[in-house]
Amino acid sequence: MAVAAPTFLYAVSALAASQTVPDINITSADALLTKFVQIMNWIFSAALILAVILIIIGGISYMTAGGDETKLGTAKKRVIWGLVGAAIVIAAWGLIALIANYFGASIQKPV
């Protein structure tokens, strides 16, 4: 974990540097929808990063459980809930993209 932490933190900082919080300068309904989608993309990116972190922590906990059934159960739950969280975030992004395309807003994929 100590060896992988600097690499992971570098990747997260590089991703954070590429993501900027959008300016709120709204002049029309289309601009409002576009800003909403930009803000949601930023939130979805952060949520996906948290889901991946939860999956990694669950995997490490599983490997270091040492056969203890309680620790194994907790680790499995972390991995499962991390996967469920990632699936919910991806489905929510798809719904936002569908609605934005319907109304004609410009969207881009998160991360």
Image (cartoon, rainbow, N blue to C red):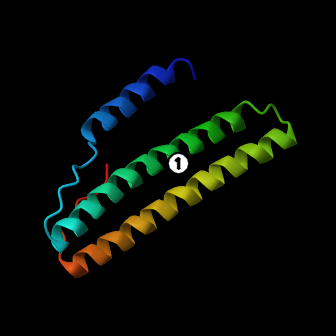
Q: In this view, does 53 lie to the left or right of 60?
A: left
Q: Name the residue under label 1.
A: 51
Q: Nearer the viewer, residue 42 or 77?
A: 42
| Residue drawn at 46 percent across, 60 percent down | 89
Image x and y of residue 91, in percent? 44, 68
* Residue 20 sits above or below residue 99 on the image: above
Quadrant occupied by the N terminus: top right
| Amino acid of disc 1 | Ala
Q: What element carries label 1?
A: helix
How dense is the environment of label 1, judged by Cα within 10 Å: few (below 14), some, or many (20 and up)?
many
Residue at far left of view: 27
The mark tally for this picture is 1
* Residue 107 sits above or below residue 12 on the image: below
| Residue drawn at 80 percent across, 31 percent down | 66
| Residue drawn at 19 percent across, 71 percent down | 105
State the image quarter where residue 71 is shown.
top right
Q: Nearer the viewer, residue 71 or 92?
A: 92
Image x and y of residue 90, in percent? 43, 62
| Residue drawn at 26 percent across, 73 percent down | 100
Q: Is residue 25 left or right of residue 52?
A: left
* Residue 74 sits above or below residue 11 on the image: below
Q: Which of 70 and 23 is in front in this view?
A: 23
Residue at far right of view: 69
Image x and y of residue 9, in percent? 43, 27
